[in-house]
C-alpha cells in the first residue's frame, strides 16, 4: 500500500488513517510526538512510523511511500498532537 510521507528540513511524518492504527492494534502505542488532523495521524519518522511499518509487514503488507518534501517548516507541526482515543464517529 502507498502512503504519503511529508518532510521538512527538520523532520518527517507518515500520513495514516486513524482507523488503520486501530485495526492494527497500535493506536495506543503511538506517541504524542506524532500529530493528528481530520481522521489521520501524521506519524513521526523516528519511532511511530517504523512501528506502523512493522505492524503492516507482520501482516504481509509492503508499505510504499509518495514523498512530499518542503524546504520550510511543514504545517503538520501546527496540527494537534496525537491523542489515543480521539477518533470520532464518521472519521475515515
Image (cartoon, rainbow, N blue to C red):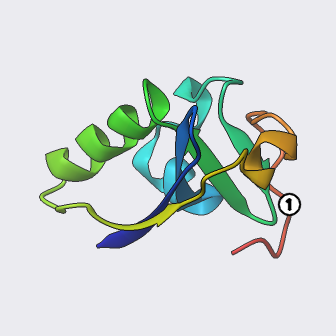
Coordinates of residue 20 in the picture (x, y in percent): 51, 59
Q: Secondary structure at mark 1?
A: loop
| Image vertical order of residue 81 relative to residue 1, above or below | above
Name the one closer to the observer, 74 or 42. 74
- In this rendering, position of residue 44 left or right of residue 59: right
| Image vertical order of residue 43 relative to residue 88, above or below | above
Q: Which residue is mark 1?
A: 88
* Residue most extreme to the left: 60
Question: Could you tell me which residue is drawn at 43 percent across and 25 percent down?
Answer: 46
- In this rendering, position of residue 76 left or right of residue 88: left
Q: How many marks?
A: 1
| Image vertical order of residue 42 relative to residue 2, above or below | above
Question: Could you tell me which residue is drawn at 69 percent across and 75 percent down?
Answer: 92
Specify few, some or many for label 1: CA neighbours under 10 Å numbering under 14, 14-19, or 20 or more: few
Coordinates of residue 4 in the picture (x, y in percent): 47, 66
Question: Could you tell me which residue is drawn at 37 percent across and 33 percent down?
Answer: 51
- In this rendering, position of residue 58 left or right of residue 5: left
Coordinates of residue 57 in the picture (x, y in percent): 17, 49
- In this rendering, position of residue 40 left or right of residue 60: right
Name the one closer to the observer, 36 or 59. 36
* Location of residue 37 by image quarter: bottom right
Coordinates of residue 34 in the picture (x, y in percent): 65, 34
Question: Could you tell me which residue is drawn at 75 percent across and 36 percent down?
Answer: 82
The quadrant of the rendering that contains the N terminus is bottom left
* Location of residue 59 by image quarter: bottom left
Amino acid at each position: 500500500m502507498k502512503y504519503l510521507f511529508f518532510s521538512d528540513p527538520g523532520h518527517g511524518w507518515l500520513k495514516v488513517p486513524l482507523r488503520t492504527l486501530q485495526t492494527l492494534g497500535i493506536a495506543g502505542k503511538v506517541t504524542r510526538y506524532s500529530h493528528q488532523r481530520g481522521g489521520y495521524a501524521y506519524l513521526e519518522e523516528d519511532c511511530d512510523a517504523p512501528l506502523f511499518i512493522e505492524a503492516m509487514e507482520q501482516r504481509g503488507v509492503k508499505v510504499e511511500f509518495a514523498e512530499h518534501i518542503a524546504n520550510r517548516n511543514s504545517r503538520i507541526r501546527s496540527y494537534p498532537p496525537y491523542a489515543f482515543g480521539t477518533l470520532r464517529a464518521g472519521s475515515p
